[in-house]
Amino acid sequence: MPVTLHLVDKAVWASDAQTRQDLARIYADAPAERLAMPVDGFLHGHLEDGHFFGCARFNDRLLGAVAVRADEQAWWLSELCVRKATRRRGVGSRLLALVAKAAHARGLELRAPASQLPVADQLLLSRLGYRPHATDDYFVLAPPLQGGGT
């Protein structure tokens, strides 16, 4: 499945009705424990706070998304979700690889807060090369993709 990366910030959200619809569908498919608030509140709040989403695009539709919060050193990932109909096909893994490549091109690490991750997500991150940071409560993408680690 040839999945590409589509970054969605507030401007893209405001200008693209299909993107709004697809992102809402992605997170509507999320397990109830994945989001602490209604989907619309989550999407709007994340974008209004100046953050963005990294999305997996296939045939002009978004199939998966991960919420991204950027700082000077890293992109912080949370709330990874893939549409129910396309789960177990590698979309989430491909999305994380594409986000890693984009962050690396900007000289940034990828991190995910550990205490907020369900065990299944921790296992996925470990399988994809993320490791717990030596002293802080987050996972970081380890070499070779980021050229660094803990």
Image (tube, rainbow, N blue to C red):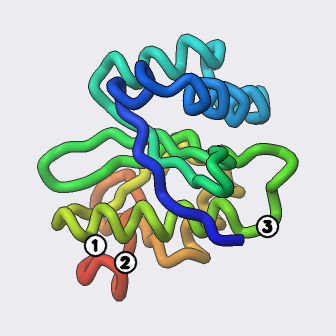
Camera-nearest label, 3 or 1: 3
Q: Secondary structure at mark 2?
A: loop
Taking the spot 31% from the left edge, 20% from the top edge, the residue there is 49
First of labels 2, 3 by sequence position: 3
Camera-nearest label, 2 or 3: 3
Indicate whether 128 appears above or below 91. below
Q: Position of residue 116 (x, y in %)?
A: 53, 41
Taking the spot 28% from the left edge, 72% from the top edge, the residue there is 150
**Which residue type carries mark 1?**
Thr
Between the C-alphas of marks 1 and 2, the distance is 7 Å
Question: In the image, which disc is placed on residue 150?
Answer: 1
Between 118 and 96, the one lying in front of the other is: 96
Question: In the image, which disc is placed on residue 89?
Answer: 3
Q: How many marks?
A: 3
- Along the horizontal axis of the image, is 86 left or right of 102? right
Between 90 and 110, the one lying in front of the other is: 90
Taking the spot 12% from the left edge, 49% from the top edge, the residue there is 72
Disc 2 designates what residue? 142
Q: Secondary structure at mark 1?
A: loop
Between the C-alphas of marks 3 and 1, the distance is 30 Å
For residue 65, which quarter of the picture? top right
**Which residue type carries mark 3?**
Arg
**Which residue type carries mark 2?**
Ala
The answer to whether mark 1 and mark 2 are in CB contact below 8 A is yes
Indicate whether 97 appears above or below 137. below
* Residue with the most extreme bottom position: 144
